[in-house]
Amino acid sequence: MLVTISSPGAAVDATGYRSHPVGTRPEIASASRPRPLTLEGVSFSYRSDVPVLDHVDLHVAAGEFVALVGPNGSGKSTLLRIALGLLRPDEGEVRLFGEHPEQLSQRGRLGYVPQRPGAGEAVSVTVEDLVRSGRLARVGWRGRMRAPDREVVRHAIAAVGLDDQRDRRVRELSGGQQQRAFIARALAAEPELFVLDEPVAGVDVESQMLFRASLVHLLEHHQASVLLVSHELGAVADDLDRIIVLKSSIRFDGTPDELSSSGVALGVHRADLPLWLEGVV
Ligand code: ADP
Ligand code: MG
C-alpha cells in the first residue's frame, strides 16, 4: 500500500515562539529561512545489487516534530546518515538549512544522537564534561563558557535525569544512562535540528517521559525541529506533527490523525504501530 498525504500548511506565529501546546500548535513558517532538512529523489545502496533507499523525498519544516518509523533494515539509519552528510547519496539532493550537508558551516545548529553513540567514542570523561563538550560545539572551541552556557549544561543534564551522575565517568553508567548522557550533550548545543536514532530503545518509562519533556522544551522554547527514529512512540505520540513510514521508499507521510484514519490508533493503542508495519509495509 502506498499512501501519500501532504503535510498541513504552515502558519506564522508573530512572536516567533511556539505559544501553542505541543500537539495542537500550528507549524511555524519557514518563509524567511530555509527548511532545516530536505531530501529529494535520494537513492542509495551499500552494494550495487541491494538498493537500500529508493527515490526518497522527505522534508522537515522549521519547528516540526517528525517521527521516522519502519521495520528493521528499512533504511532509517542510512537515511539519517545521508541527511547529515555522513554518507553521500548515489542519486538525489540533500540540503541542511539550505546548504550541502558536508558544507554546513555551523555544525552546532545540528544535534545528532546516533543509534549506538558510545561505540567508538572516548567515554572516559565524566557526564558533565561530555555535556559541556556539546555546549562548546555551539559557542565554538575558542569561545568561553559563560554563566548562561553553564546554566544550559546544568539544564541539559537535569532534563535527562542525570543530576546525581554528573561526576561519574560515562563508561561506568548503564547503557540507558549512557544514551541519556549523549542526548544531554546534543541538547546542550540547543540545536535547530535535532536528529535522534532510536534514543529510547530499552529505556524505562520514567526516562522516556524525561526525554519527552526535554524534546518539548527544545520545540517550544527554541523553535527547534526534531527528526526522531523510534519504535517506541508512546511517550511522544501526542506531540508529533507528522509520521513518515519508510521501507526503502516512503510508504506513508502524514499526520498522526491521518495515520489513525488508515487504521492505526497511535495514541490509544500505541502498540498497534509495529503490528501495522509488519502487516502493511
Ligand atoms: P534501519 O536503521 O532501518 O534498521 P539501516 O539503515 O541500518 O536500517 O540498514 C538498511 C540496510 O542496509 C540493511 O539491509 C543493512 O543490513 C544494510 N546496511 C546498513 N549499514 C551497512 C553497511 N555499513 N554496509 C553494508 N550494508 C549496510
Ligand atoms: Mg537503525
Image: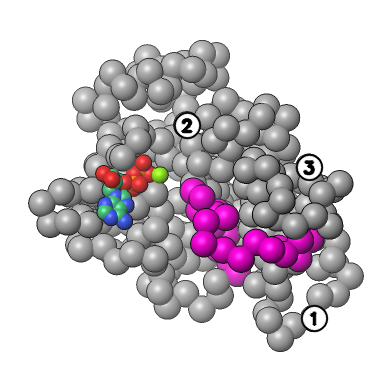
Q: Is residue 222 visible?
A: no
The amino acid pointed to by label 1 is Arg
Report which residue position mark 1 lands on.
Answer: 144
Q: Quadrant of residue 175?
A: top right
Secondary structure at numbered mark 3: loop
Circle 2 SS class = loop
Q: CA distance from mark 1 to mark 3?
A: 26 Å
Which is in the foreground here, disc 1 or disc 3? 3
Q: Quadrant of the C terminus?
A: top left
- The three-letter amino acid code for the residue at tag 2 is His
Q: Quadrant of residue 211?
A: top right
Q: CA distance from mark 2 to mark 3?
A: 22 Å
The answer to whether residue 281 is seen in the rendering is yes
Disc 1 crowd, CA 10 A, few/some/many (<14, 14-19, 20+): few
Residue appearing at x 56%, y 43% in the figure: 199
Residue 123 in percent (x, y) is at 65, 61
Neighbours of disc 2 within 10 Å: few (<14), some (14-19), many (20+): some
Q: What amino acid type is highlighted by mark number 3?
A: Gly
- CA–CA distance between discs 2 and 1? 39 Å
Classify residue 1 as left or right of residue 115. left
**Residue 231 — which label?**
2
Which residue is drawn at the image coordinates 17% and 49% (left, top)?
Answer: 51
- Chain-order first, disc 2 or disc 1: 1
Residue at the (35%, 60%) spot, across then down: 82
Q: Position of residue 48 (x, y in %)?
A: 12, 57
Q: Residue under circle 3?
A: 161
**Residue 109 among magenta residues:** yes
Q: Is residue 70 above or below residue 36?
A: above
Q: Which residues are magenta?
A: 108-130
